Amino acid sequence: MKRRMFLQRSTAVIGASALGGLYPGILSAQAHENTLRIAISKAAGDLDLLKHYAIWAVQDLMFEPLVKYGKGGEIEPCLATDWSLEDGGTTLKLTLREGVTFQDGTPFDAAACKWNLERWMGTEKFEWMSCSKNFESVEMVDDYHVNIHFKAPVISLLQELSYTRPSRFVSPNAVDEEGNQVEPIGTGPWRQVSASEAENVFERYDGYWGEKPSYERLEAKVIPESRSRVAALRSGELDVIGGFWIAPLSPIEAKQLEDAGFTISVDPGNVTLVMGFNPDRSEALRDNRVRRAISLGVDREAVGKAFYHGYARPAGSLFSDVLPLSGQQFEAPARDVAAASALLEEAGWTGGPIRSKEGKPLSIEMVISPDAVPGLRIMSEVMQAQLKEIGIDIVIHSVDHATKHTEMLERKYDIGFFLTYGAPFDPFGTIVGLFLSTFKNDVEGKLYTDAEHLDPLINAAIDAKPEDTEAELQKFYDWLHDNDAIAPLLFVPGIWAHSDRVAGFTGPATEYDMPYENITLKA
Amino acid sequence: MLRYTGNRLQQSVVLLFLASVVCFTLVVSSPGNVAVLIAELRGMIGSPGYVEQIEQEIGLNKPLLIRYADWLGNVIQGDFGISYRTGHDVNADIMNRITVTGMLVAGGAVVATVASLVLGFIGAFWPGGITDRAVRGFALVGASTPTFFVGALVIFMFAVILNLVPAVGFNGLKSWILPWITVAVLPAAVLSRVVRVGLEEAMASPYVLTAKSKGLSRFRIMFRDALPNITPIYINALGTQIGLMTAAAIIVEPLFAWQGMGDYFLNGVRFRDFMVVQACLLLFLTFFIVVNLVVDLTVMATDPRIRRQRSGA
């Protein structure tokens, strides 16, 4: 082959490859017309409901529960249309929705319901759920009526039944003989077409029993970097980004997008950022006057503005009022330098610029993990400056997410930061997990425990009759407040951004649900 | 040459073993308990005893030496184990991801090579002129700008403002352009200086004077005589830059949502996913060793002086 011919041919091959590369881009632009493209920050993972790897929000697209957790904690009908608790709370009588089929055509009836529930209820693996721990049996009354019997009344039973996994329902034909889910086939409005490390693609399930989405396809695209998600939204490659667990959008990015003309949707948030004290490590923090002084010394408004750009509400209570049984809302303490200084004086911490007592300076180590709570570095530096004004030396110790868990479990901090579990787990998820001393929490550590005073209040709330639960919980909330055991800082907002292609967007009821409902796509 | 290659391969095996020991030590001595992270990932926050259960499940309760021996035994048989984070087979994950990183590094290397040769040549052809100064300026800025910033900049310019190419994704040539540019800027800047300085030195050699006296044009002398003479230095520098580009994949891949080895490694480190981290480190190291070996052999093949020197040794 002559040199000239070689050059001509190789140019032609390179040109054809380039066009081949560009062509899918042109095609995909046309194919997006009826498709909602939403970001997820990591690959969806194994969607088996009895395994623990998948992103909940992706499972939410295909799998449905008996009852759904609605906004404000309202329990709404889903695959069950009616329910009642009988026999002192030990029997749950369910009426199942008729005319529901799984995406493979299998009918959803009492047999499918019983088969699903018996896969996990009463097993050791799911003992962490009260309904599983107390499970006795499932009884099929007829094709559309099922009774679930429990050994004892189950706290937050309906909330647990609304969880994404393991509570939701998979087609019995999608599970092999060894019990492994081989295909993600549920009763939900979306059917998975393809899945990879880069994206999961869904098409609308036209046999869906409820209101069907107005668009035909949904693509969940894996984009790990927050800045790249923002860029992809701005360049028109995505329609929706955000959510605390799905594809977090930082407040500053939200502000930039808002300025660029994108619509920002901010939900009040059902997770609280709480400052926790460790009196076992810091002698100063054993005195509740010091804890109160710290709480009064922090300007929650300023901290919120420094990082959340006004999207977050200052918190005075453990739980936001958007959660059920969140109790009386205490007002977020306003910053009061004089009152904080007086409290420290009263506690014997005097002098300056850093106060001391018996020759020991008032130095407190604050452990933060910006991986766990994005922006915590900025917030902690603001707090450090504010507390210095009242004579407290805050030493910031920044660790990564993995180290944070170890430090929290081993209680190697004076002040640490905790997030409450949020909907649908709260209030009891956080109360039992982070406050009950007899409950072993190997993952998060404890926010505050007091076996003598706090445990009896928690146990009373757990054991209370439904009509007394609210009053019993209030005693627990009052105790925390009166003793300055914790310092709630902010209610972490759920921040979403979407392009003008998307109309009717509403944030999901929990941070674990995908916000696809009510959306219409403009041409 | 064969004996030299054999010696280098033997050294590589020893180096790989030592590296695996160092990797293992680093991973196990880093703070944080992977079992706690798995429990959190699985949503088992409120499950007493679950962390111990996981520790048993993944063998964290075994003595360190046994864990290392188990891992090494499996690796020798080509089995990198199961990822703690995803439960996937690490071998399968690597097979899926290695082509993505290969595409990034290969494309970046081509862009860097072409850009550096053109820029270095132009700079040397008109020394001291405005073009030379511009190339020098590019080299200075390119070599001192962090890769993540270059990435953010090109995404903003070409995807957000001009809307010419996608900001993220791995879908054909159009989506490969920005990652290639991002990963190539720094090596192109460094290599353009290698070419520029190399050509300047070569042009001061006696053989160039001879060529000039024969009436050959400056372009012809630089292209046909001086450029081949700087090949060994250039290949050496290119080898180092390819190694650095592989490391840059850790930053570039997540930025462009490419699911390659860099992204895999980063997630492994964040999660203390021992199996993934170890596998990635070993592969990266193997790649560095192979690249260095290829560079040495190429240099020997292209430069008879080095070939004689090493064969003599």
Image (cartoon, coloured by chain):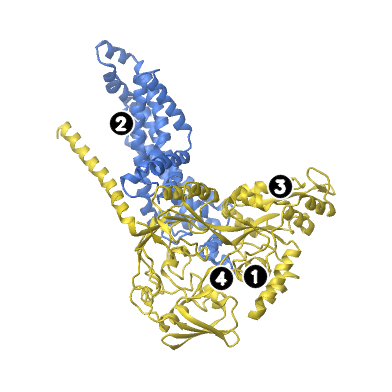
Q: Earlier in the sequence, mark 3 or mark 4?
A: 4
In the image, what residue type sits under mark 2? Ala
4 vs 2, front mark: 4
Q: Distance between the residues labelled 1 and 2?
A: 69 Å
For mark 3, name the chain.
Answer: A
Residue B10 in view here? no
Residue A439, disc = 1
Residue at numbered disc 4: A73
Which colour is chain A painted? yellow
Pointers 2 and 3 within a single chain: no
Q: Residue A386 carries which label?
A: 3
Q: Badge 3 local density, few (<14 within 10 Å), some, or many (20+)?
A: many
- CA distance for labels 2 and 3: 67 Å
- The image quarter containing residue B104 is top left
Q: Is the same chain shared between marks 3 and 4?
A: yes
State the count of labels: 4
Mark 4 or 1, closer to the camera: 4
Q: What residue type is labelled 3?
A: Gln
Which is more N-terminal, label 1 or label 4? 4
Q: What element carries label 4?
A: helix
The numbered mark 1 sits on a residue in which chain? A
Mark 1 vs 2: CB contact within 8 A: no
Q: What residue type is labelled 4?
A: Gly
How far, Cα to Cα, is label 3 from label 4? 36 Å
Q: Do labels 4 and 2 share a chain?
A: no
Image spot of residue A73 (x, y percent): 56, 70
Amino acid found under the numbered disc labelled 1: Phe
Q: Name the residue under label 2.
A: B301
